[in-house]
Amino acid sequence: MIPRYSRPEMVQIWSQESKFRIWFELEAHACDAMAEIGVVPKEAAKVIWEKGDAATFDVERIDSIERETKHDVIAFLTHLAEIVGDDARFVHQGMTSSDILDTCFNVQLTKAADLLLEDMDKLLVALKKRAHEHKDDICIGRSHGIHAEPTTFGVKLAQAYAEFDRCKARLVAAREEIATCAISGAVGTFANIDPSVEAHVAEKMGLAIEPVSTQVIPRDRHAMFFATLGVIASSIERLSTEIRHLQRTEVLEVEEFFSKGQKGSSAMPHKRNPVLTENLTGLARMVRAFTIPAMENVALWHERDISHSSVERMIGPDSTVTLDFALARLTGVVENLVVYPENMMKNLNQFKGLVHSQRVLLALTQAGKSREDSYRLVQRNAMKVWNDDADFLTELLGDEEVTSALSEEEIRDKFDLGYHTKHVDTIFSRVFG
């Protein structure tokens, strides 16, 4: 985790203090459940809760024990025994390290998902607001980076809203899939711990029980979770790339907000660069990169190994912290985006009516011309605009083959911009309800 791209609330989820607190809660809840079935004295379970709950776990002390034991969970349990005293012998009865490590990891991922869902809600609010604000601002649509037909900037933002709404639904599903608990002991058979303990811990931690854990929670769940984060990152990059293209000097239809005192270049004082969306493009690459090791973690040896452990210690915090930052940054970009409708119209008219070529093509076919002849006639006049800076409407009106099929009024009618936006309301009703 790099502080530059981190926000405190998400970072806190992954702190050592938070992790050890979750470990304690899992152990203490398990003691409560075991006390109910007579495995642990009820008074001991009470003491464990009281002393552990009031304690501040000493991270440095745990680290020093681990340097000797070479085992993180044993180091924690040793430190907990120093706090609790004799009753600590009842902690971790019939449990294995993976019960704590895996369940804790899923608790952290669930908490991270909740923060990310809050982030996405804020982004969706911003996109909806700006989409309605620019619903009727006509701009040129582009395919292959080349002028195609008119759309509106509001429709562009409505598309982004719909995409992130799908991303949110995926994250909700991924959160549900990752929110499982495994307290099943060595190789997951419950030989030394009753399944009721797992059920109790799961309920207390807001998790579902893992049907078959084989000592570790199956990593296909985690692969799905991190893949979902990767898809969200890709959607962030898609919108960021669109904004970057639209901010190019030759286009300048939108622009990231440039604050007073901000500098764009150390060498060129005139520069106002799309630095935020460029940054988001880079951050998206990092989050997406974590999906491959997450998928490779699925294939563990037999009931378990720990080849996944080092991977998850990195990708858990790094992916969620980075995506949290990226979503918040993108929300700020959208909220403060400067939009230039005048430049949109200027760019749309740059090629003097070419954007209406399809309407003329269709009109000629409706008038009796073959599609091949219609395409030839329209393209013949369109190329004069490309090559000779001619006016498309003027060329069509001067083409006898065209005017033999269509009247001047019919041709001029095909240059109405409103024709292209007549179903914007339908699109908005589909997206926003």
Image: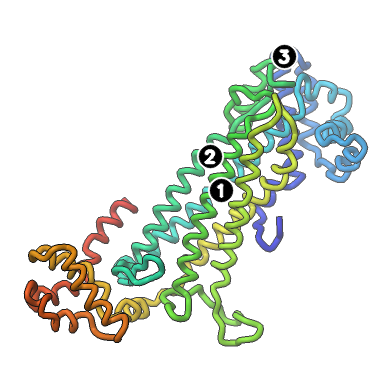
Q: CA distance from mark 2 to mark 1?
A: 9 Å
Rendered location of residue 173, percent (x, y) = 49, 38
Where residue 408 is drawn, which disc sits there? none
53, 119: nearer the viewer:
119
Say if mark 2 contacts mark 1, CB within 8 Å. yes
Judge depth for marks 1 and 3 and give the one in front.
1
- The answer to which of marks 1 and 3 sits earlier in the sequence is 3
**Within-10-Å neighbours for mark 3: few <14, some 14–19, many 20+:** few
Rendered location of residue 162, percent (x, y) = 39, 53
Query: Tag 1: residue type?
Result: Leu
Residue that carries the numbered disc 1 in the rendered image: 229
Query: Tag 2: residue type?
Result: Ala
**Within-10-Å neighbours for mark 1: few <14, some 14–19, many 20+:** many
Which residue is located at x 85 percent, y 43 percent? Answer: 58
Q: Which secondary structure lies at badge 1? A: helix
- The answer to which of marks 3 and 2 sits earlier in the sequence is 2
Q: CA distance from mark 3 to mark 2?
A: 30 Å
Say if mark 3 contacts mark 2, CB within 8 Å. no
Rendered location of residue 233, percent (x, y) = 54, 54
Residue that carries the numbered disc 3 in the rendered image: 191
102, 278: nearer the viewer:
278
Where residue 174 is drawn, which disc sits there? 2
Q: Is residue 14 left or right of residue 131?
A: right
Query: Tag 3: residue type?
Result: Ala
Q: Which secondary structure lies at badge 2? A: helix
Which residue is located at x 76 percent, y 44 percent? Answer: 17
How is the protein colored in the picture? rainbow
The quarter of the picture where the N terminus appears is bottom right
